[in-house]
Image (tube, helix red, strand yellow):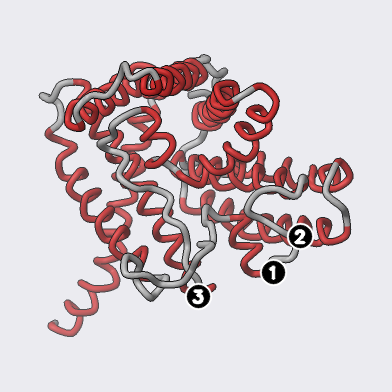
Amino acid sequence: MQDLQQPTSASELRALAWTAFLVPVCTVYARSACRRLRPGRHRLAALFPTFLVFIYLPCLFNSLHLRLLSTFFHTWLATNKLVLLALDLGPLHPSLPLLPFLLCAGLPIKLRVDAQPTKQQPSSPVADFLVPCARSFLFLTCLAVLHPHTAPLPLYVVHYLYCAQIFLTLDLVFSSVGLVAAAVLGTGMERQFRAPLVVASVNDFWGRQWNLMAVDLLRASAYAPVRARWGRDAGVLAAFLMSGVLHELLYWYMTLEHPTGEMLLFFTLHAAVHVAERWAKLAGLWRPPKAAAYVVGTGFMVVTISEFFFGPFIRAGIDVRMMEESTAAVELLRAVAKRLIIRPFGHVSG
């Protein structure tokens, strides 16, 4: 990595303060502008300054974890949502009340269309996220305990554990955000992940298991318009290529180095396999038993992620830096717990 400084409490709190100020200002401005302008190029031009702000926000952070989250929350999701809003598409609309608009624009949440409770859904919108939060926290703790003992494991097993850590971290963050938003708004939120650690196919992973909000936005901004003109396969390729470009941008944010093109290659490969899977199923050439499908699908995901996705980040030292940040965060939590719990009891007993 080039010039990314080590994070400090002061630097990250300052960045969080600026983010907490700029995101609501930009979203209030966007809502106000869209209430006055019709969809089209004039609305898009009016919202353009907010795009620049959201693209810049990750650069405020020195922590890789916070850079990663800001890149996804603001540079990817918020910018994409506002571009779609300018065209009268996507999950945002100027008629939304101010608070739901602010939360939906700046956070990775999506209001549930049918918020009526069913037998499968808890009656409380908050209850949807309590179990995922607890589950992800528990398994992340187990992975943290396991990490010092992973040296003898095969490379692909270690990288599968990396995949599990990424999923559990994102699920914990998104579920926590969804829990708070559901409590504030009093309405149900869509879940963003299902069970992506064991999948039957590439289509299963990208279409039904992983990061469903990003999938919805890619479907609206890349897949749908390209499909309408050049067909379904071209739409799939456009969506994967757009995701590849966004991940190349993520690589730059995390390393400050020129992208290597491996992210784009990874998503191009998955686009080709996605299309080939559909053709093979339609022709009756690929209908394996369920167990075999899960083994092949999960194996393909782990191998390609290991070879094409993790490689550039590992060579740049991102995994080491993020592990150092995680260790520092754990030590900080221990120090805070010691100050808040142990010292008062020790003072009383003395």
Q: Earlier in the sequence, mark 3 or mark 2?
A: 2
Quadrant of residue 119 within the rendered picture: bottom left
- Distance from the alpha carbon under mark 2 to that under mark 1: 8 Å
Quadrant of residue 100 within the rendered picture: bottom right
Q: Taking 98 as reference, is 168 left or right?
A: left
Is any part of residue 127 visible from this angle?
yes
Which mark is drawn over residue 186?
3
The residue shown at (74%, 65%) is 95
- Distance from the alpha carbon under mark 3 to that under mark 2: 22 Å
The residue shown at (54%, 26%) is 236
Which mark is drawn over residue 31?
2
- Distance from the alpha carbon under mark 3 to that under mark 1: 15 Å
Point out the image quarter for the C terminus.
Answer: bottom left
Are circles 2 and 1 on residues that touch, CB within 8 Å? yes
The residue shown at (59%, 58%) is 104
Q: Residues within 10 Å of mark 1 (few under 14, many from 20)?
A: few
Q: Residues within 10 Å of mark 3 (few under 14, many from 20)?
A: few
Above or below for 134 versus 327: below
Kindly identify the amino acid type of the residue bearing the numbered disc 1. Answer: Leu
Assign a secondary structure to mark 3. loop
